[in-house]
Amino acid sequence: MPAFQLPFPCGQIWAGQTRTNHSPLNSIDFNRSDDIGDAVVASAGGKVTRVANEGNTSYGRWIEIDHGNGYRSRYAHLNSQIVSVGQSVSKGQKIGTVGSTGGSSGPHLHYEVRRNGVAIRPVFNGATAYFYGTKNYTSKNSCGGGGGGGGGVTGTVNTSGAALTIRADASTSSAAVGSVPDGAKVTITCQKKGTSVTGTYGTSTLWDYIGSGYIADAYVHTGSDGQVAPTCK
């Protein structure tokens, strides 16, 4: 079986609900407060086999990924889909956003894993999901060191030319401890709120810790609005 993880960025906490009247029975509904538009990521690497829109019925907007050996994952009721059929995706790569399309009664992600076409109980980080009821899960998707996730979330600095100052803390008045060039790839290990900064991607109080210090998230593209990494302690 592929090493499936939660279909959300590292460190996020989601309530997963399973119930005896769910269709299919072994699927899970994930939700948290104000979750519409939140990033949905691939729970394992694979190739996209379906990017569909059922309109106001069933799954609504949904995606299916083939992981090999008969395993496929499905992500339904999406607000948006940003991948295409035939595209290869890596574990933790953003594929769409949480929505309330199709037969959904409110914003959530309907998630399922299928083996040879039959829905099975999903496994996250080596542990089978809780059946039946609701359980809070913390995503470990692409958190780990080495390969793939690189120990955090990857972002791209976009300042339209100037180097971005690295600060000792999440404040524009904090000491400068270095800089990163425009276009550089950075690994965000955690984030916290600090001085409000207006940058390429709007105004934000989020700052990203990149190992040597903090940079303003308003200048960093991660493929998702809002916090994508754990909160810095």
Image (cartoon, rainbow, N blue to C red):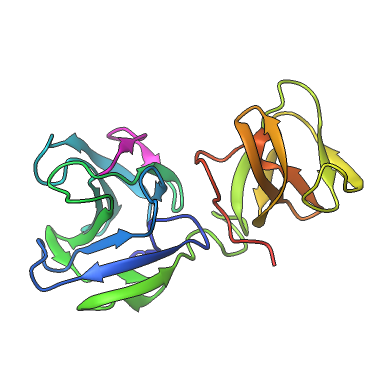
* Image: magenta residue range: 78-88
Tell me: residue 92, above or below residue 94: below
Query: Residue 164: x, y in percent?
Result: 79, 34
For residue 155, what is the image quadrant? top right
Check residue 85 for magenta coloring: yes
Q: Quadrant of the C terminus?
A: bottom right
Position of residue 78 relative to residue 1, above or below, is above
Q: Confirm whether residue 122 shows in the render.
A: no
Residue drawn at 12 percent across, 46 percent down: 103
SS majority, magenta: loop
**Side of 227 relative to 205 (left or right):** left
**In this image, 143 relative to 189: left or right?**
left
The answer to whether residue 69 is above or below residue 77 is below
222, 218: nearer the viewer: 218
Identity of the residue drawn at 20% across and 41% down: 101
> Where is residue 18 drawn, in percent x and y?
21, 71
Which residue is more in the foreground, 209 or 35? 35
Q: Position of residue 102 (x, y in %)?
A: 15, 42
Q: How many labels sit on residues?
A: 0
Q: In the rendered image, which quarter is residue 82 located in?
A: top left
Residue at image coords 32%, 71%? 123
